[in-house]
Amino acid sequence: MRIAYVIPAFPPAPSQPFVVNEMIEVQEAGHEVFIVPLYRGATALRHGTFARLRPAGVFTPALVDTGILAGALRMLLARPMAVLRTLGALHRAAGKNPWSHARLLAVTPKALAAARWLAAVRADRVHAHFANQTADCAAIAGTVAGIPFSFTAHAYDIYAGAPRFRNDTLGWKLRRAAQVFAVSDFAAQRLRAQLPPAARGRVHTAYVGIPLELFRPEPPLPSGDGLALLCVARLAETKGLATLVDACALLRDRRVRFRLRLYGDGPLRQALAAHIAARGLGAEVVLAGPVPQEEVARQMRACHAVVMPCRQDHTGDMDGIPTVFMEAMATGRPVISCPISGIPELVRDGETGLLVPPDDPRALADAIERLARDESLRVRLGRQGRTLVERQHDQHRTARRLLHLMLGAGPPAGVGEAAPS
């Protein structure tokens, strides 16, 4: 099978190792992987596993250049009615939201040029990771080229409600896709609710997988020097990091011995550093930059627990199931978080971790203190977490399931034709 992945950037973004790991598993299962990136990757950080990705072809990473514009024009001339009807339907779906129309206009030349390229390489499926612009590109390219398209929905791409980020074309893509995958049952149920009953079977839960050979179970750490806490995250509102810092201040005031290492980058970095300083936590909390997967694995081995009190932000956005939770549990480390979105599907309160209400520093501090004082609880949660991750998030298994679903499903009626809205 020849599968063309539409992804945000190439080289791939280091914050999305699950996308690359899936493509590696697909190629190692004997399928050809082609890549259509929306943008050129801008970061030098690379995970070691990325070296195993050997795509059969990569479309030009630029969002637009003279070659893309020429390819788009050729596709428009070759299939004018298919192009115009597809674009017209998507823009009608975008409604009165100027941001949605702008996003469509931005990806249209790339999508049309990619349609021509995908037909030339005889791709069997166009699959996008994320349900927003990448899925817009896959939908246009697949529909115009007559190739079934599908997409995996993650989190902000379906949850964010602010006009600038809202996915107004989601309903059209749901109706037209050969299949739709979601990274949690919570997300899958939300997507199915937007479809008529007869079409809901095309929406599947496809859990993210991680490399279990990298994240191996490790013996519990002794706690003689206090509890070693770890958080690896994009520094954004959805992660609840201000709550985590406030909980750390409470732990210090309670004289609970701990240290927190926080790795990542993002829009709240300066505000978070200022908050740590304002709380007088310079000795207990270390704010570091983003690190590759291999260093994350090393830090997992050096901690007692992973803490990230996820929350819903002011736009409605929230996490799916953070990959770092899978990595922690695979290492045998318990997780403390909050019961939002798909998180309880992995962090099961009292079984594989502890759940506390979001935006509640006192409850979070209580949970951390509970782990600090109960080594047997840490060990039990870590052991049971590893068992669940082996069953639910082994990337070999998750990729095989995805391929099985793709190979067993034909396109719905009308795929490959220009669709009405």
Image: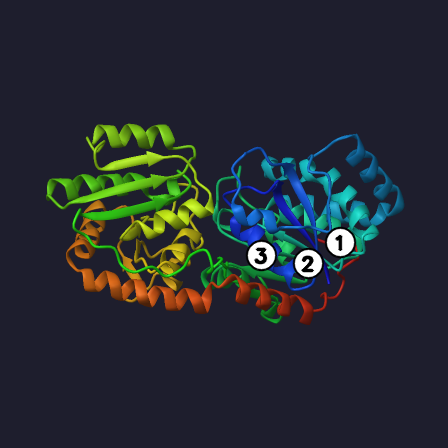
* Viewer-side label of 3, 2: 3
Query: Which is more toward the observer, 24 or 307?
Result: 24
Badge 2: few (under 14), some or many (20 or more) residues near its Cα, within 10 Å?
many
| Secondary structure state at the residue bearing disc 3 | helix
Q: Amino acid at mark 3?
A: Glu
User: CB atoms at circles 3 and 1 under 8 Å apart?
Assistant: no
In space, the residues marked 3 and 2 are separated at their CA atoms by: 24 Å
Q: What residue is drawn where x is 43% and y is 38%?
A: 290
Q: Amino acid at mark 2?
A: Arg
The residue identified by callout 1 is: 143
* Viewer-side label of 3, 1: 3
The residue identified by callout 2 is: 176
Q: Is residue 394 left or right of residue 139?
A: left
Above or below, comparing residue 252 to residue 301 in the picture: above
Q: Earlier in the sequence, mark 3 or mark 1?
A: 3
Badge 1: few (under 14), some or many (20 or more) residues near its Cα, within 10 Å?
many
